[in-house]
Each structure stands twice: as structure tokens, then as C-alpha cells.
Amino acid sequence: MIYFNVPVKSLFVASSVLIAIGSTLAISVSTQATIPTIIAQTKPAPQTDAAKQQLLGQWQTKDPESGDLVTFIFAPEGKLFILFPAPEGAPESPPVALGIKYQINSTAKPGQIDLVFTEEESIKSIFEFTDKNQLRVELEGRKAGQSRPTAFSSEATVFEKVSQTTTLPANTQVIDLETEKKNAADNQLPRPQSEAKLYIGMMNKAQQVYYREQGKFATEFEETGLGTEPGSAYYTYRLASPGNEKESVMITAQAKDSKLPSYTGVVFVTKSNGKATTIATICETIKPSTSPPAMPTAPSSGSSEIKCPDGSRPIQ
């Protein structure tokens, strides 16, 4: 697991493509121990100059469910930036991009591509350039540690090239996963806490997506598209809709070890320019506790601040 020290509502965007990628890092807690062994066997894939040159630039695909445009910017030296759409209700927000690495082997048929999040976590997939100058990549449902697919499915993601530029928009906030992981290690952030924060962040965003599509929040883990209730050696996760499932939803991470803090994630429905939108946060107990924070306080009229209850603090 990797801890992102950025606002959850900005990072986890309303896109099934990005949720699928994010799920690679947030879910499958029970399989983490096997991932390093699999990734350790991966050797850098050779890259041909022609394929590298064709790949460079900005590629976009439209999420079929949300309609959001997802932008992949393939830059020189094997750098890939996934540019997130602006959060709903905040189009003026600075752009946010996830910075990772990529490797290709265009001599294989179909071509091979690795999306490298960290040294321990990457997605092995396949790609091809179509006759219409499109890029097709097998992304849907891919997870770190899975073997590489041998053929494209009907769910393969198709990108259109929109620009040759490999630079990011001005003022873009870049989240580099290797840097975030190193910072967490330097600060001696325990791995269990990283797990809880990331999973709750993903669940908050999945609930925002669900609300936009359904007009209410999901009451079961399966409804969010992030799988069943997660199993963890460190935390017990619970999903609840206090009061009204059309107004708020809460997920808690209750520590099983008294030396760890507990967490509560919450999503509220608010009004922005007369339009219903959602806002999320995560509260962490200030001291180690096996009791998650109580329900946070919803933002007051005209405010975007969610107040964590006494004994806890916001972590974003």
C-alpha cells in the first residue's frame, strides 16, 4: 500500500478507468505479500525508438459511465502522467496528475506495456496502435501481480491522440508514488496506517461517483465497485449511512491493535451554485485508539470545511 499525502477529493477522480488503476494500489490487502515476489521477476522491457516516438504526447479517453475525459501524457525517459479531471463543483482547482513510469516492448505481438507505480507494484498489460491512429490498452480490471494478458478484450480502453506535447498544464500538482512512499518511510509511517488511509480515500471517492450516478450513497461495499468488505490484519472496516443515505455516508477503520490510530471517512452532499455536489474527508484519532472517530460535522452553509470530532483531526 502507498499513502498519498494529497486531498482525497482531488486525487481520486470520478472515472472507472482511474478507479480500476487506483484499486490496484488500494485493494487486495491479503495478496500484498505475494506482489513483491512477482514484480521482482520483472525485467525492464526493451523499447524501440519508433514506438516510443509514436507514444509520446497526450492521449485521451472518455469514461463511458461518467463522461469524464481521462488524459495520459507519455513523456520522454519512460515517464507517464495521468491527468485528473477537475473535481466536480471546483473547475478552478489546480490540475492534479499522478506521475508513474512506463516500459514498452513493441517487438512482442501484441505490444507489451508495464505501468510502474513503484518498484514493488506495477501492472503488466498489452497495447497496440490501430489503423485510426488510436491507442488501445488492456486496462480494465488489471491489478498488480497479475500475469500479462495475451489478447485484447471487448473492455479494452481506446485512447485518441490529442496533442504531441509532453508537458503538463501550468500549476499542475504532481503526485509521484515513489517519492510519497519514500516520505512515508522517512517519517516512519507504519504500513497499517497507510493501508487504512488509502482504502478509506478510495471508498470516499467511489461513494462520490456512486452518488453522482444514483442520487444516493451505496450501503454495501459491493455496490461501490471496489469489491467486497476488505479483510485486513490491522483494521476492521465498516460502512454506514447515518440518518439519510441521500445526505451522507461514513466508512470507519477500527484498529485491531491498541497501538494504532483509527479512522473515519465521510462524504456529505452540499450545494454549490444551487447544484448538489459532494465533499469528503478523513478523520484520524489523535492518539492510538481502537474506537474510530464519531460522525464528523457537515459543512455549514457556504463552507467546504468538514469538522472532525473532538479527539481526532483531518489528515488531508
Image (cartoon, rainbow, N blue to C red):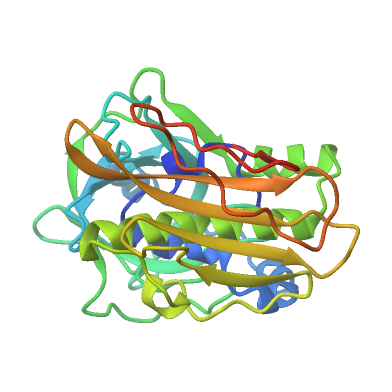
Residue furthest toward the top?
A: 170
Relative depth, front residue between 20 and 309: 309
Relative depth, front residue between 226 and 105: 226
Whether residue 298 appears in this view of the structure is yes
Residue furthest toward the front?
A: 243
Which residue is at 56% across, 37% downward? 307
Task: Report x, y in % for residue 4.
Answer: 60, 44
Task: Report x, y in % for residue 264.
Answer: 62, 55
- Is residue 137 positioned above or below 222 on the image? above
**In the displayed structure, does residue 122 sit left or right of residue 166?**
right
Image quarter (top left, top right, bottom left or bottom right) of the N terminus: bottom right
Relative depth, front residue between 14 and 278: 278
Relative depth, front residue between 252 and 205: 252
Which residue is at 78% across, 57% downward? 191
Which residue is at 50% across, 31% downward? 174
Which residue is at 76% across, 43% downward? 311
Whether residue 114 appears in this view of the structure is no
